Structures are given as structure tokens and as C-alpha cells.
Image: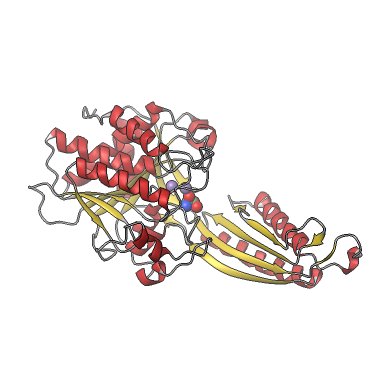
């Protein structure tokens, strides 16, 4: 049983402090990537890194790193602990922030304990993990792992018409380091599960062994605006109705799926958006996921075929734009075992899991052995202010992270 413990009060205090930063006038937490409110969160995180005596580095895509180079740690590739501090709209306080702040807590605890790592240990807060303002999601870690050219990422136009690179410069987080400057030896990410499994099974630790594939598209359906009262139903080219058919198609397919396909239309807008005008245009997003690569491709193909039939049947035109596409990812088996062993030593049950959510770990897995630790989410709720994980679970997860980091930073 490992007897070193994180400073629970310090970790919980920081989670709640960061959770107050970036609330709008209705009290909703909104720290969208590269926004003024996210800058406030970034500034607070950097201040904590500096207080901890860590070297702070920011790269050109705004990824923030706190690096502990212990005098005895030869110039080897660092162990990287990461996640994100940007949020969705009306977010909870744990998604991403818990993993970043637990990483800082683990480093501070190890430093204070006199532990001498054989390699540097770094904490990362990756830019734009959520992808709400700029697509794709997990963008900062994708650039860091070479999956997206920095210039392309910086040129991304947001849902508000802003340009990511200009916004990063404006908020003072267009850093000097070249993305990918820090080549991790291994990567571990601690995150709230954001699903119902651990709570339902009464298991405090998830050892995440894989992560499902993600397909994001933006769709535009063009019909013909017409009078809502005078136009016979048979003459309508109703973009709103066609969009509704797509939404029902996605749900029906996901509900009938023999695997765990999930589908969501999270954003939708009609034009001219008037009560008595048949919509001439519907613009909406499709988030389609499946842990099986072939199934995901099959669902995408079925959707494409349905769109063709729908366009012909409704007399509308349908265009699609790819926003993100990530294959399912399998994490490093050795690190997953280390997570399980750490849980056992702490007297904690654990369960091997698939992540339904996307995470920075899936990107860093492209360049280094990576795995994740989950803790339960009450009611499986996330991306919602009701997102909650009990303090005991948060502390248990951070202590498991402490042991995993110690193990990976001690080995050759
Ligand atoms: O979309 C996701 O799964 C993550 O929250 N960005
Ligand atoms: Mn997250
Ligand atoms: Mn999220």
C-alpha cells in the first residue's frame, strides 16, 4: 500500500477556484477555447505552475506546459500528464480541469516528498480540447502529436467567425515553442468518466484501455422558403422537415445498433427562422461515434446513402462538411496494468473501460504510450453544470495517478 498522499484540500480548493473562473452573467461556466474567459483560467493555471516552481512553456497553438526538471533527472524524454481547461457551454467544473490540476498536485506532492524522478515530469493543459468554438476537438494535442499542421490549426475559423491564431495572440497565449517540442516518454490522463458505468457498478477507478472513434460533420440542407399558410404540403421543399428526418434517422440507427453506436445533433439553425416561413435552409452538426472502426464507417455510409434518398424525395439539396474524424484508439496495455496495480495497492476496485468521450490521450497515443484513469460521474452526467464527482472519488483518483506517475518516472 503506497503511503504517499496528495494534498486533498489543495487539489479540491483549486478545482473549485478554477470552477468559478469564466462564469457569465447567468452564472454559467463558459470558457471556450481562446476566449477572454478562458484566458482568465489559463492565467490562473500558469500562476499555480509558477507558485509550484515549475518551468512554464507555451507553444504556438497555446498548449501550456509546466515542467519539473529534477536535478537528478537526466535529459530524457519527460513523463507527461495532461488534459484541458477549456469548457463547453454551461459546463461542469471537473471535465478536463480535474486531470490538469491533479497532474499539478501530483508533481507538487512528489517534489515535497523528496522523490527523485529519473526523468522530467510535465503537466499539459492542451488548447481547444472541446472543439465547441473551433473544430476539430482535441486540437491542441492533435497538433502536438503531428496530426494537424500548426498553420492549419491557427487558421481555423470559429463558429463566431473568429480565427484561432488571432485569438491566441489577442489573449497572450501564442507561445514561442514549436508544437511537439516536448516528446513524451509516456502520457497519463486522469478524467471524470462522464458516463454512468463506474457509479452503476460501484467501482471507484476506471483503467481505460481504449477510446471510441469519432465522426463530426456539419450539414446544410437547402430548400425553398415559402408561405406557411398558403403552400400546399405537396409543393413544399421544407429544409426544416428534411433536417428532422436526418435527426430521426440517426437516432433510429443508433438505437437499433448491435454495437454501441451513438449519434447526436447538438447544433441546429433554420433560415430565415420565422414562424410563418417554411425554412429555406437548415444547418446542423452530426456527432457519430462507435468503438468499432468498421461499424463507424458503415454508419457514415448509411447516413450518406440516406441523405441522397432524402434530397431526391424532398426536392432539397444537401451538402456536408467534415469537421473531425478520429479512428478508435487502443491505449498502452502496460500502463493500463500499472493503473490497475496502483488501484489494488490503494485497496480500490478498478474496471477496464472504453472511453465514450474524446480525450487528449487519444492524440498523444499517436506519439507515446498513453492510457487514462477514470473516476465516477454521479448520474453519468457531464457537459452539464450538474456534473459531479464526490471528493473521496476525486482524491482516490489523484492518489492512483500519483502512484502511476511515480512508477513511470522511476523506471528506466
Ligand atoms: O467531444 C468529446 O468527446 C470531448 O468532450 N471533446
Ligand atoms: Mn474532457
Ligand atoms: Mn468535454
- Report which quarter residue 8 is drawn in: top left
**Position of the N terminus by quadrant:** top left
x and y, in percent, of residue 207 in the image:
38, 41
- In the image, taking residue 184 as reference, residue 350 lies left or right, namely right
Colouring scheme, one of rainbow, by chain, secondary structure, one colour? secondary structure
Task: Report the number of numbered marks.
Answer: 0
Q: Nearer the viewer, residue 118 or 60?
A: 60
Looking at the image, the residue that sits furthest to the left is 72
Horizontal side of 125 relative to 72 (left or right) equals right
Is residue 375 something that shows in the picture? yes
**Picture quadrant of residue 113:** top left
Viewer-closest of 345 and 395: 395
**Frontmost residue, 407 versus 269:** 269
Horizontal side of 395 relative to 192 (left or right) equals left
Q: In terms of depth relative to the viewer, which is nearer, 301 or 49?
A: 49
- The percent coordinates of residue 61 (x first, y second) are 34, 62
Residue 100 x, y percent position in the rendering: 33, 44
Q: Quadrant of residue 404?
A: top left
Q: Is residue 127 above or below residue 311?
A: above
Left/right placement of residue 204 relative to residue 402 reads: right
In this rendering, does residue 343 appear at all? no
Residue 127, how many percent across, how many down?
Answer: 37, 56
Residue under the point 36% across and 46% down? 40
Amino acid at each position: 500500500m503506497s503511503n504517499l498522499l496528495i494534498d486533498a484540500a489543495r487539489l479540491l480548493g483549486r478545482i473549485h477556484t478554477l470552477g468559478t473562473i469564466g462564469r457569465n452573467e447567468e452564472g454559467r461556466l463558459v470558457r471556450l477555447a481562446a476566449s477572454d474567459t478562458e484566458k482568465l483560467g489559463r492565467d490562473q493555471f500558469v500562476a499555480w505552475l509558477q507558485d509550484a516552481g515549475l518551468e512554464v512553456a507555451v507553444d504556438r497553438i497555446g498548449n501550456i506546459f509546466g515542467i519539473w526538471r529534477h536535478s537528478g533527472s537526466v535529459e530524457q524524454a519527460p513523463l507527461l500528464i495532461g488534459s484541458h481547461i477549456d469548457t463547453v457551454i454551461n459546463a461542469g467544473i471537473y471535465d478536463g480541469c480535474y486531470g490538469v490540476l491533479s497532474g499539478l498536485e501530483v508533481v507538487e506532492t512528489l517534489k515535497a516528498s523528496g522523490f527523485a524522478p529519473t526523468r522530467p515530469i510535465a503537466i499539459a493543459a492542451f488548447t481547444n480540447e472541446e472543439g465547441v468554438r473551433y473544430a476539430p476537438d482535441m486540437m491542441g494535442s492533435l497538433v502536438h502529436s503531428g496530426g494537424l499542421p500548426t498553420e492549419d490549426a491557427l487558421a481555423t475559423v470559429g463558429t463566431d467567425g473568429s480565427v484561432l491564431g488571432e485569438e491566441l495572440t489577442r489573449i497572450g497565449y501564442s507561445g514561442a515553442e514549436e508544437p511537439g517540442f516536448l516528446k513524451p516518454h509516456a502520457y497519463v490522463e486522469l478524467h471524470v468518466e462522464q458516463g454512468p458505468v463506474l457509479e452503476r457498478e460501484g467501482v471507484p477507478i476506471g483503467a481505460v484501455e481504449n477510446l471510441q472513434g469519432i465522426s463530426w460533420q456539419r450539414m446544410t440542407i437547402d430548400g425553398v422558403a415559402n408561405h406557411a399558410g398558403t403552400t400546399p404540403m405537396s409543393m413544399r421543399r421544407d429544409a426544416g422537415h428534411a433536417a428532422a428526418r436526418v435527426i430521426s434517422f440517426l437516432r433510429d440507427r443508433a438505437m437499433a445498433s448491435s454495437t454501441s453506436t451513438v449519434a447526436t445533433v447538438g447544433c441546429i439553425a433554420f433560415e430565415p427562422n420565422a414562424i410563418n416561413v417554411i425554412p429555406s435552409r437548415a444547418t446542423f452538426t452530426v456527432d457519430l461515434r462507435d468503438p468499432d472502426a468498421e461499424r463507424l464507417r458503415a454508419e457514415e455510409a448509411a447516413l450518406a446513402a440516406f441523405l441522397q434518398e432524402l434530397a431526391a424525395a424532398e426536392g432539397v439539396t444537401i451538402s456536408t462538411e467534415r469537421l473531425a474524424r478520429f479512428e478508435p484508439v487502443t491505449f498502452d496495455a502496460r500502463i493500463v496494468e500499472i493503473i490497475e496495480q496502483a488501484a489494488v495497492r490503494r485497496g480500490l476496485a478498478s474496471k477496464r473501460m472504453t472511453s465514450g468521450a474524446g480525450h487528449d490521450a487519444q492524440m498523444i497515443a499517436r506519439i507515446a504510450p498513453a492510457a487514462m484513469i477514470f473516476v465516477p460521474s454521479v448520474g453519468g452526467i457531464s457537459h452539464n453544470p450538474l456534473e459531479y464527482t464526490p471528493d473521496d472519488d476525486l482524491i482516490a483518483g489523484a492518489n492512483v495517478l500519483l502512484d502511476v506517475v511515480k512508477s513511470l518516472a522511476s523506471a528506466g
